[in-house]
Image: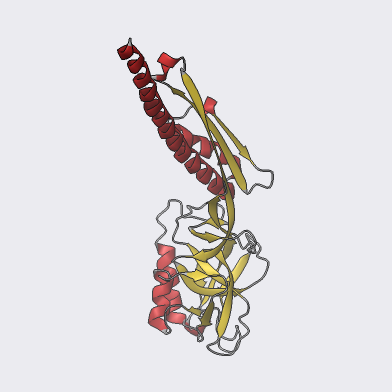
């Protein structure tokens, strides 16, 4: 009799340890799947808002969760997506105590927010803060005779001079930049390095047909990150303040000698970096889990 009572107690403990552990395992696994789905769906809001829900659902399926267990909702303002999921954990040992299963529930919200810091890859071009128009051709770098007192849109990142400037065009600046940082303009037309650097990036697009403003791969080399600053109305090499970051689709570099002009269009894209809810929207976003 004592052995029987002891065995019942032991089985009870085994059921608690094993089945509660199983619930914790599935909750963690489901949480990872839901987080991934929310982030993927939120990112798709920028590129193809109509595909955001299906993108999130694809991630749930890849993690072996059935569509019947998942609900996905895009918020009305189109900047966030919520994923709710549940999974019935089937008990093993707790059945002897009359418990057969229990559902675990997980929810996550992915939201796109303007970037306030970029860890690497910024190109050495700046534009004054303004409301950007997407699909309109902008001159990112002015030619000789334009600009302001020797400044044509170039900025100095990690050093000055033609060699550093060229490397920053081709490779992107290796350092971290944040809204509020002070950077220095790069005066002079820098025509040769500009032409060679931009031509290099344009030729790196291997897509067929080539990426365009209306149809592009988000990782296309023609898409660069540039800095929004408080002013470019400065004299010679001067300090300016970063106000934000934008994504620019390169379309060409034209002119010879001191007439090297870089043109393209601003676009909406997603990158990695820090985000801020109060940051001015310049079309470059990060994705964050809000819950």
Q: Which residue is outermost to the top?
A: 1
Figure quadrant of residue 73: top right
Q: Which residue is outermost to the left?
A: 3
Residue 127: give x, y in percent of width and height: 59, 74
Number of numbered labels in the structure image: 0
Residue 168: give x, y in percent of width and height: 42, 73
Confirm whether residue 250 shows in the render: no
Confirm whether residue 111 shows in the render: yes
**Compared with residue 87, is residue 180 higher up or lower down, i.e. above or below?**
below
**Compared with residue 194, is residue 275 higher up or lower down, i.e. above or below?**
above
Residue 260: give x, y in percent of width and height: 51, 78
**Compared with residue 77, is residue 68 higher up or lower down, i.e. above or below?**
above
Q: Is residue 138 left or right of residue 211?
A: right
- Foreground residue, 217 or 119? 119
**Residue at image coords 54%, 46%:** 44
Figure quadrant of residue 173: bottom left
């Amino acid at each position: 009799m004592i052995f029987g009572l002891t065995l019942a107690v032991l089985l009870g403990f085994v059921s608690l340890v094993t089945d509660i552990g199983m619930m914790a395992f599935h909750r963690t696994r489901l949480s990872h799947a839901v987080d991934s789905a929310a982030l993927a769906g939120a990112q798709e809001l920028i590129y193809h808002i109509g595909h955001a829900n299906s993108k999130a659902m694809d991630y749930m399926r890849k993690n072996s969760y059935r569509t019947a267990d998942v609900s996905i909702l895009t918020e009305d303002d189109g900047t966030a997506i919520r994923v709710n999921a549940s999974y019935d954990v089937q008990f093993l040992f707790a059945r002897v105590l009359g418990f057969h299963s229990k559902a675990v529930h997980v929810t996550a919200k992915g939201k796109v927010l303007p970037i306030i810091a970029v860890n690497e890859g910024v190109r050495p071009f700046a534009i004054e803060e303004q409301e950007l128009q997407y699909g309109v051709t902008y001159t990112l770098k002015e030619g000789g005779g334009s600009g302001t007192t020797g400044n044509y849109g170039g900025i100095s990142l990690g050093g000055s001079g033609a060699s550093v400037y060229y490397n920053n065009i081709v490779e992107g600046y290796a350092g971290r930049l944040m809204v509020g940082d002070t950077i220095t303009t790069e005066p002079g037309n820098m025509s040769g390095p500009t032409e060679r650097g931009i031509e290099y990036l344009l030729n790196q697009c291997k897509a067929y047909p080539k990426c365009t403003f209306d149809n592009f791969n988000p990782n296309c080399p023609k898409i660069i990150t540039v800095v929004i600053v408080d002013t470019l109305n400065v004299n010679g090499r001067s300090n300016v303040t970063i106000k934000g970051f934008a994504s620019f689709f390169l379309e060409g570099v034209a002119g010879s000698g001191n007439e090297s002009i870089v043109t393209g269009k601003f676009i909406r894209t997603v990158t990695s970096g820090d985000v801020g809810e109060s940051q001015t929207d310049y079309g470059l976003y990060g994705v964050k889990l809000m819950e």
